[in-house]
Amino acid sequence: MIDQEYLKHYQPIIFRSFANAINEDHLSHALLLSGEPGLPLKEVAFFLAQSLVCDHRSPLACGHCLNCLRFMDGNYSDFQLIDGSISSIKKENVLTLEEDFSRTAIQKDAKMIYIIHLVENMTSEATNSLLKFLEEPHAGVYAILTTENESKVLPTIVSRTTNMAMIRSDRNSIIEQTHELDVPLNDAILLADIANEPSMLFNLYQSDIYQLVKENFLSLVKSFSLDSQAAAYVLQKNIAANIKSKEATRLFLDLMITLLEDTIKIKNNKEINFSFLRPEIEKIASNVIHPEKIVKEMVKLRGEIDLSLNLALVFDHLGYYIIKES
Ligand SMILES: [Zn+2]
């Protein structure tokens, strides 16, 4: 769970600057929270929003007052979330939000907050609507935007927000802390880059999606260590049939990216992340000629998942690419 202690410990800069701004009453009406994939962006955005409405801040949300309880239960009425991790954000989403908020802003003087999670996943029409809304802020309306890729956010949006950047925690310390939560070591190793916070990692470990993706990933690693043709076949037949959601595809690609990066590290005699798969990764490293090209292609594919209508094509393309670069 993200709370004051998490922020103080792992994100001290955000903790200090947000606490100062809110308690000295000079908080910007729009924040842009940026951080690499795997960082708890949405969770931190929620906690900052909760801190705005808390009646007993010390210095951030107390977690016990009526407003905090309402907020945590999803019963705080003057709050909205537009989640770009689920589907791309459209103009209608932004317009509905603006209408609701503009109407309410006239009626009462309560704080109204909206979060736009992964603002880079907006259509250009939605971005234009948001820009107008940011340019004419209503009193008491606060925006918290998040992004995993600031370079993909329109500069005009960036310039109208106060940027707060999250920092990544040390991989080994995440693995150690998650191990204390009874997550098996190998699972912690697989997930440490994908969920850069112990409770997030724990939740992901317990999810059905992870179990499905892990099983498919480990079976691919076995084939890949035998030869690249077999890996392509498994990707295009089995994995394309088993992994059907965008979320699962994203997770699968995340594991694949680390795997291929590990083959590059092995070629350069560097320490690898997936240490328990070393024998297989050594074989994959000798099978693949240009792992860096496959990594580049996978990063590109990962960025296009939201737009792809047919996920099987992602695996098909990846299989083709693995053969091409082997
Ligand atoms: Zn409170």
Image (cartoon, rainbow, N blue to C red):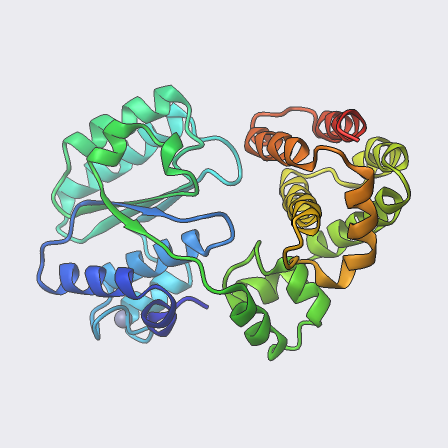
- Which of the pair 318/309 is nearer the observer? 318
Residue 41 image point, x, y percent: 42, 52
Q: Residue at x 75, y 40 (%)?
A: 243
Query: At 12% across and 51% down in the image, what residue appears?
Result: 109
Q: Nearer the viewer, residue 91 or 109?
A: 91
Residue 75 appears anywhere in the view: no
Q: Is residue 49 visible?
A: yes
Query: What residue is at 63 percent from the left and 41 percent from the top?
Result: 250
Q: Is residue 75 left or right of residue 235?
A: left
- Residue 12 pos. (x, y %): 30, 66
The correct choice, above or below, for 92 with respect to 106 in the image is above
Q: Nearer the viewer, residue 236 or 86?
A: 236
**In the displayed structure image, the side of residue 21 where residue 241 appears, left or right:** right
Considering only vertical position in the picture, is 264 above or below 215? above
Residue at the spot 28% in from the left edge and 69% down from the top edge: 61
Picture quadrant where residue 52 is located: bottom left
Which image quadrant is residue 82 in? top left
Furthest-top residue in view? 125
For ligand 1, give the image quadrant.
Answer: bottom left
For the residue pair 107 and 320, the one nearer the viewer reads as: 320
